[in-house]
Image: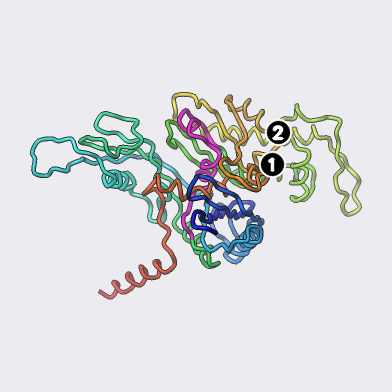
Amino acid sequence: MNSSQTIRVGLDIGSSFITCAVAEKSNESDGMKLLGIGRSPSAGLKNGSVIHRDKLMDSIEAAVKDAELMSGHKVDRAVVSISGENIRSINTQGAIAIQKNQHSSLPVENEITEHDVFRVMEMARALSLPSDRDIMHVLPQEYVIDTMDNIKDPVGMSGRRLEAKVHLITVPSSAAKNLVNCTEELGIQVDGLVFQGLASCLTTLDSDEKELGVALVNIGGNTTEVVVYHNDGIRHSAVMGVGSNSITNDIAVMLQVGIGEAEEIKKKYASAKASMSSTELEFDLQVKNGGLARQVSEHELSRYVEARAQEILQWIAREIHRADIREKLTYGVVLTGGGAQLRNLVPLAEEILNMRVRLGISKNISGAVDVASNPEHTSVIGLLHWMDVKKELAPAAMPIKPTFERAVSWLKSWIKGFY
């Protein structure tokens, strides 16, 4: 590895799978080359919270080992994703006076510095939150200088008052800490904790889409994240406790088969639109315990699948509406995640949402293109870009203290308890 290249690692903790990606980042250009990717079924996790540490650590370790084997690089640090229904978001704002000349009694317009931006962001995040919640992301929407609004970078401009409008994403403190602890106990330093829906945005959306309006929908196994952009800022984000596994469960109940078999049937024969499936094409169901052989048509299967897919899309429509954007989203909706691969989901979404809909795949990455272009990998590939985006959003990321720093802070508080 020469000095012009660095290794990036993303660890996506999903509701169905845990995925680890290793990439090579060129320091001389924006090029990112995928070197390896590993995947294992998710275990020990429910609704984004750790419920069985050993099982989760085994799943993470399996995904990391596969990625190490494929890439030929040891993983000792990574950017980690988190999701779950307990993640909450809110739009808020903060304002400060720009006063550099303390000796003058006259109002003077002063140049805004990076320190002023830091101060106004701190004001914006100074909310009274429950003691069990932490702010994970402070994402700028726009800045206002006196009466001038829609400013994206106020540094170097002059004014008397600076206001920041931001989108806050909060996470349960225990869920974040437990996830970080499990990862660090495997010898992997956590360089950042990122909302899974935001990670998908980093590699699937371009600047025009974010400016003119777009909603990214990341459909996972048990959760679906919705992130709405407009005027180059996030206006709304949410996590719904429903995903593609609900369709699998419907198939299992309807056909009286196991979950594993139902998942295979969904991938091979299910269509989100029954009208686009064949009434003549039939498939055999496995015979178990001496039962009778059965056949089901693709059309009959898809009628049940369509009903559930419509319900999920209607929930998505409600979340997009909560963004309260008066103008219509010019670029409509981008579907990504493993659940977005359901056949004919895009045309059904266009009917239900009454918007343009496209399938989102990762951009700006080379190497193993067949793997990188899979919609189910957009979150983990987005994590590879986080360290670049984090610089633009500072102080946006929730600080993740290394184990040693946590020990020192605990020791200080313990000693203070004697005085």
Name the residue carrying label 2.
272
Q: Nearer the viewer, mark 2 or mark 1?
A: 2
Quarter of the image holding residue 233? top left
Query: Which residue is rendered at x = 26% and y = 35% of the image?
Result: 157
Q: Is residue 321 left or right of residue 74?
A: left
Q: Residues within 10 Å of mark 1 (few under 14, many from 20)?
A: many
Query: Which residue is rendered at x = 8% and y = 44% of the image?
Result: 103
Name the residue carrying label 1.
247
Whole-percent x and y of residue 352?
61, 27
Whole-percent x and y of residue 75?
56, 62
The stretch of residues the image draws in magenta is 190-216
Q: Residues within 10 Å of mark 2 (few under 14, many from 20)?
A: many
Which sits earlier in the primary sequence, circle 2 or circle 1? 1
Q: Name the kind of residue labelled 1 in the image.
A: Ile
Q: Name the kind of residue labelled 2 in the image.
A: Ala
Disc 2 to disc 1, how far (Cα)?
10 Å
